[in-house]
Amino acid sequence: MTTSSQRSNQPSKVERKPSKPHAPLTTGDVRNIFYGLMLGMFLSALNQTIVATALPTIGRDFGDFENLSWVIIAYLLSSTVVSPLYGKLSDIHGRRSMMLVAIGLFLVGSVVSAAAPDMAILIAGRTLQGIGGGGIVPLTQTTIADMITPRERGRYQAYMGTSWIVAGVAGPALGGVIAEYLHWSMIFWLNVPFGLIAGLLTYHAMKRLPRHERPHQLDIVGAALMIAAATLLLIALTSGGTRVPWISSTIFVLVLASLVLSLAFVWWLRLAPEPFLPLTVLRNPVMRAGTAATSWMLGAVLGLTVYMPLYFQVVHKLSATQAGLALIPIVVMTTPGSMLSGRSMMHLRRYKISAIVGATIAIATVTVLCVRPDMPLYGVIIALTLIGFGAGTVYPVATVSIQNAVPAHQVGTATGAMNFFRALASTLAVAIMGAILLAGLGATPERGTGVELLVETAGAAGIDMAAVFRFVFVAADIFLIAALAAVLLMEERPLRGPAPSAPPVSPQVPPAPAE
């Protein structure tokens, strides 16, 4: 008979055997994995921009404009709430398997959306797309962390920004062309071949990716509480001022329910043996400050990206196409800022300096817009260029600092949590800026209302549109100041990796794609 002491000394059958150490990744391995990640990132980014220009065509085709906004909101909600879930699951099952799951769900959602016979099925397909697409971004960032040391990681983080640039510039134009000359379903069918290629690259290239797994338990209760709280809050933020008034019982109930569930989630974190978001990660000061920095910076930039086209049309009388072209600098210049900041992290011991300088430039530029919201068009274009460049310097510093500050087996969880809180904060920032704009106009247009009606309403009331946007710029400036404060408060821990004077581990890195 086996005694209890003997049983305690025997290995548990559920314990995993330590995985065999992988040989160091070659330059070719890194390049192959990197290109697969770039393609996946591009697909995720493209689907946040390509659909918007086709919405009127989709609404006419289905004869349903009332629920048209949910084509966008469904993707936003589902992709936001699942991002920390992918981070945790990748720490348990590995990056490769979860990336394949994310790409697979994204492809299935694309097929459902393309073949949708009505608006309800299209929204369901977009939700499934978001569940897959919401894992691609955090898994990409985490995979780079597995391959590259923190000191060298910044330049790779910067390269990933090119996917967002191409998607931001090409997405609206491509969506408009497809909707005008082809059928809108081609927007979703287009994902299938590219998604299959990304899946094949992921399947083959990531086999040799090093793993930092430990036996984990998935906290189902904690995940459900957090996802429910986030979903209710996002519905409130995306519905307030558009579908229902901000001061309404609907918004009050949604926010109250979200708050109650959030308190229940915090309470559960202290009881769960292995909480969904480990307290060691949430209590990490670098995690908190870095997440705040990237969240408020993204919120300011995203808010400007959403509302500047309207500014160009009503203040500078540009057409919709011209307004879209005028917005390109803030999108494009983010990547040069990220690249400069990422490369500086390889050589500077005080690597936060690039983010501090960049954020200061962005704050000073937006302050000029606050003072002179009616400045000439060329001045606004220059301002957007400087804002995009300055904002870009913060993202790699914050992301790499967070990944450098947590153990290797928690990088996925920390990265997923960062993306989750960043999405919530940026959505809140956009909602605040939108509420300020609508209050200044003295109108609450329904979803889908054109610019002409906004201008007509403001003109009839004798409203100075430039003065209205001054307060939108003030809100953006406040968010930028909050981001700079978070960068200043973030501890500057030494980055793991070769010394600045040492040659890079992988000297032949993939070049940045041509813009």
Image: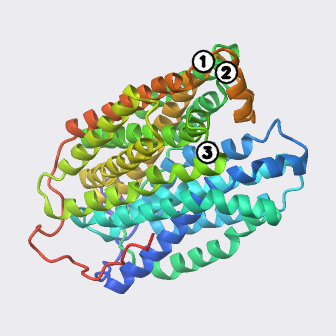
- Graded by Cα atoms within 10 Å as few (under 14), some (14 to 19) or many (20 or more), the crowding at tag 3 reads many
Depth-wise, is mark 3 or mark 2 nearer the camera?
A: 2
Disc 3 is placed on an element classified as helix
**Dot placed on the residue nearer the N-terminal end, 3 or 1:** 3
Left or right of 112? Residue 27 is left
Residue occupying image coordinates x 82% and y 51%: 58
From mark 1 to mark 2, how far is it between C-alphas?
6 Å
Classify 230 as above or below 252: below
Closest to the observer, 52 or 107: 52
Residue type at numbered disc 2: Gly
Crowding near the residue tagged with mark 2, few <14, some 14–19, many ≥20 C-alpha atoms within 10 Å? few
Residue pointed to by mark 2: 459
Give amino acid for label 3: Leu
> Can I make out residue 11 in this image?
no
Please name the residue that numbered disc 3 is placed on: 76
Q: Which residue is mark 1?
A: 463
Mark 1 and mark 2 residues within 8 Å of each other at the beta carbon: yes
